[in-house]
Amino acid sequence: METSQGFYLPHHAVIRSDKTTSRLRIVFDGSAHEDGHLSLNQSLYTGPNLHPTIFELLLRYENPVEFTAGVKSAFLQIELELPDRDFMRFFWTDNLNNEPYVLNFTRVLFGLRPSPYLLAATLKHHFEKYKEQYPRTFDLLNSSVYVDDLIGGRNDVPDALRTTLECLQIFTDAGVLLRKWRTNSKQLNLLWQQEGVGTEFSENSAVDLRPSIKVLGLAWDSERDLIYFDPKYLLKFMSRKIESKRFILSVVGFIFDPIGILGPFVIKLKCLLHDFWTLGVDWDSELPPKLRHKWQQWSSEAEDLTEIRILRYYLGELDQEISIF
């Protein structure tokens, strides 16, 4: 709700049982607006994109010793100027029987258009302080942080340990906590524990029960060092079992495959969509028998997508090298 002196943000709860932290999160909607009025997001300057592309990062995701970490409450580490806080108001109550009261954010809020730029610019400002002292770690951080995720690696464990400890120092000096560390190296994991680095799982976790984590949208089994597509949300959406062109087109949005792991499978679906347009199938009409059969066959195969797993690091040990000019 817009006023002459500020803005009131609507909000709702989002529950994610698959998360290891923040399973219940309050989401504030900066794109909501009244008829005839601009939303807060429409009124804000986005700022330049300072992040690398996901494809770029995944192409570099190929070191023998890989590690990931996340910034705790990244956006909330950046303070807002006093005049800007009036545009970050929201209604709240501790008791549904009482009238709500007004609060406002004093920190940058996730979900607003300029927030990714403000976070990236702030982090890069702090990285710059260590450009001379830790040049290799500076280069890594400057090119391998995507929003609040760090994705990096080195060729051996000692170098990886040194880099992660330097990362921790840089972020700590910036007043930011790097947490949920994960690596494919058991040796590095033990060294982290000796150094007091907080890993994502406790020391007593059973290895075989450790869940995979998401790295830029792809699932990573760090124990076996495999990456794959997790079809959980795709299958949940498809469980509605609607057979229409509109629904099947929506299914495509649940398939995130930036490096083409599912190429042959996705092409089959795109060919099916092409048939819909060629035959002039209406958005919500019943599918012709032949196309319905193709869709049902594709749907049954979707359950097996989790079996398509590839090695993250595929070069192995190179004993010999040949250079040709």
Image: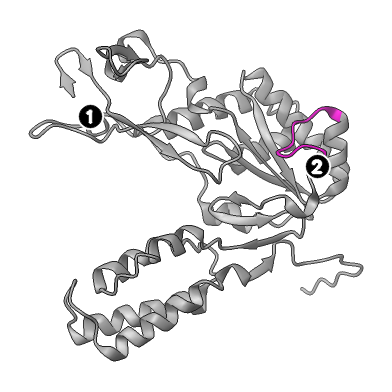
Q: SS of the residue at dot 2?
A: helix
Q: Residues in magenta?
A: 195-204
Q: Is residue 135 above or below residue 56?
A: above
Query: Furthest-front residue in view?
Result: 97
Q: Nearer the viewer, residue 153 or 49?
A: 153
Quadrant (top left/top right/bottom left/bottom right) for the N terminus: top left
Q: Where in the figure is residue 246, as x and y percent of width and height? A: 25, 68
- Which residue occupies 70% across, 57% down? 62
- Which residue occupies 60% across, 23% down? 126
Kind of residue indicated by mark 1:
Ser
Q: Pointer 1 and pointer 2: residues touching (CB < 8 Å)? A: no
Query: Furthest-left residue in view?
Result: 36
Res 254 seen here: yes
Disc 1 marks which residue?
A: 43
Q: Where in the figure is residue 247, as x and y percent of width and height? A: 29, 67
Q: Nearer the viewer, residue 72 or 292?
A: 292
Image quadrant where residue 89 sits: top left
Quadrant (top left/top right/bottom left/bottom right) for the C terminus: bottom right
The secondary structure that dominates the magenta segment is loop
Q: Is residue 319 above or below residue 54?
A: below
Task: Using the image, tell me which numbered label, if any, was put on residue 160.
Answer: 2
Image quadrant where residue 298 sits: bottom left
Q: SS of the residue at dot 1?
A: helix
